[in-house]
Amino acid sequence: MNLPETVTINDVMLRDGLQLEDKILSVDEKNDLAIRLIEANVKTLEVGSFVHPKLVEQMSNTGELFDRLKKYEAMNLITLIPNLKGAQRAANHGVSQLNFVFSASNTHNLQNVRQTTEESLLHFETIKDFCDEHNIKLDVSIATSFGCPFEGEVAEERIHFIVKRIIDRKPNTLTLADTIGVANPKQVYQLTSSIINLYPNERFNLHFHDTRGMGLANILAGIKAGVRSFDTSLGGLGGCPFAPGATGNVCTEDVVHMLHSMGIDTGINLDDLITTSAILRDILGHELSSSVLKAGKYNRKYPIPQ
Amino acid sequence: MNLPETVTINDVMLRDGLQLEDKILSVDEKNDLAIRLIEANVKTLEVGSFVHPKLVEQMSNTGELFDRLKKYEAMNLITLIPNLKGAQRAANHGVSQLNFVFSASNTHNLQNVRQTTEESLLHFETIKDFCDEHNIKLDVSIATSFGCPFEGEVAEERIHFIVKRIIDRKPNTLTLADTIGVANPKQVYQLTSSIINLYPNERFNLHFHDTRGMGLANILAGIKAGVRSFDTSLGGLGGCPFAPGATGNVCTEDVVHMLHSMGIDTGINLDDLITTSAILRDILGHELSSSVLKAGKYNRKYPIPQ
């Protein structure tokens, strides 16, 4: 089993993770969690989104949060934007890396951002121009790349077409997202390796939800296909509010635990990560879907915690 | 991604699954669940164990259950035995396939069956003689093959030594069991492929717990290594009462859902399986760790249930 030496983890708890939570976290709480993740050496973080505050109230204090995190601006602190207006608002708060998200499936894109996929691709060009002018890195995430809650299967050719349109404008990173947790390892391997083979010098990232238990198996398949960067969410929190049946993202500490067990380094301090997950659980006041938070990490030398 | 056309699932809910449950299921309840699994076309089932009734009360009605299941004797209905006495009791109830379990780690084996691993290997010879005389198939499971709750790492050489001793006597199937859910995909691939390469004509099976979320990834790694048979437990129920920190087995319906999604046939009717899991949940009166029971199976044509 040929495995890479390192893999990059992008924690999305402060964005995708919190979206379905009833409790609105304060800027203080988010700031504390962000700093703990940064200090656990999580190298990239998705911190909130600049969407319309009325649509996702949980994200309405994202600007204030970025103002508080100013001294960490050398880090990869990313924020989601759905449109040019979001990009402009983020730029006003000094955000240096944006993640533009739209859906491969027309129906989901219309529900989510009221545009067809083609309209979003044109919108992307405008946002890319804006980012280039303002020296901002632009990531792009293609939601429903592995299946849509409304349309079902999304043709591989459609993903290839969208990927090409984005790659032509040289994004910072391109993410294929399994928005509703339906991807299976064979599909992940086939789709991502076919894309990586076409664009071996571009940076790809994968985003999974663990809705049907396949999250870690999909990450393994993604690694086998050559992907070296993954979105995960602390505590396994998450889900898109506009995707029926969506549940938690694949859990950061479970992924890091598996990678470290296989000798793949992430640079992350797993103990600090588990501590932060326990703090998150206490803030939210409910159990998380994290396995490693419940069972503890496995230590080959001291298997039973003393 | 080269994948096989078919994989065999051995459901162990009625044995390993129920062991940690407080509620003792009646023979009627177990009989009904067994028949439902058989009718869902689960090809092999581990049905209870002939251990000392005082040690695992949940298993004390196993003999009666086999008497009730007589008409299904053409099926692969397996029962766990810890010793010759268990084999004799099972034979008295007409059981035609036994699973002798002992641990690769001395400390766990002493805790579990009060024998060293070497004593259990000698005991195995006696049981094999008994089974050969009575025309009974004998499976063997090596517990703690991927790690021990007391000793931690178990050397690969030790597993190879034990495997050889068993293979020399031609068991029906040999199972490597991750009793406490610590195996990782790389380890699974390395250990099992090294064994399969030595004994390409023997039948191997793998047994995982999903304690740290790696269950499905481990099954994928096992398939890549050439294994074509897996223990799973309906609803993700399970855990060894003598293994501290043990939690649920890898969930039957989640595994079947992943395999079918990848085009691997199990012969099992997934809808019937999910229905049976819901019945199990209602009998036990608590939620199960099954993802597919909660989220529903993904249907590419009708993604949102009508």
Image (spheres, coloured by chain):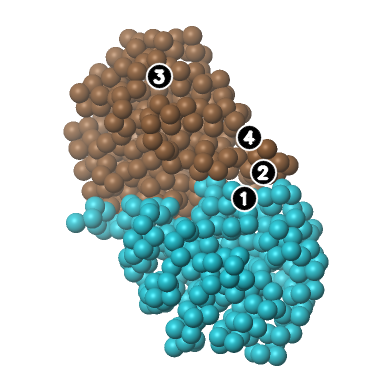
Chain colours: A cyan, B brown
Q: Is disc 1 in contact with disc 2, using a CB cutoff of under 8 Å?
A: yes
Residue A287 position (above or below residue A275): above
Given residues A274 and A241, the one toward you in this image is A241
Task: Identify the element where label 1 is drawn.
Answer: loop
* Residue assigned mark 1: A244
Badge number at residue B279: none
Above or below, B270 against A50 in this view is above
* Residue A127, image x, y percentages: 72, 80
Q: Crowding at label 2, few (<14), some or many (≥20) Cα neighbours within 10 Å?
A: some
Task: Report the Cα–Cα distance between label 4 and label 1.
Answer: 28 Å
Asked if the residue under mark 3 is in contact with the one under mark 4, i.e. CB atoms within 8 Å, the reply is no
Residue in view at x 40 percent, y 54 percent: A288
> Which residue shows up at 38% across the image and 29% down it?
B284
Circle 3 sits on which residue? Answer: B29
Please indicate whether residue B242 sits to the left or right of residue A258 in the image.
left
Q: Tell me how far mark 4 sits from mark 2, CA to CA.
A: 24 Å
Earlier along the polypeptide chain: callout 2 or callout 3?
Answer: 3
| Frontmost residue, A71 versus A162 | A71
Q: Position of residue B188 (x, y in %)?
A: 45, 49
To the question of a shared chain for discs 4 and 3, the answer is: yes
Residue A191 at least partly seen: no
Residue shown at 71% from the left, 85% from the top: A130
Q: Amino acid at mark 1?
A: Pro
Residue tagged by mark 2?
B304
Q: Amino acid at mark 2?
A: Ile
Q: Which residue is mark 4?
A: B265
Secondary structure category for the residue under label 4: loop
**Disc 3 from disc 1: Cα separation:** 35 Å
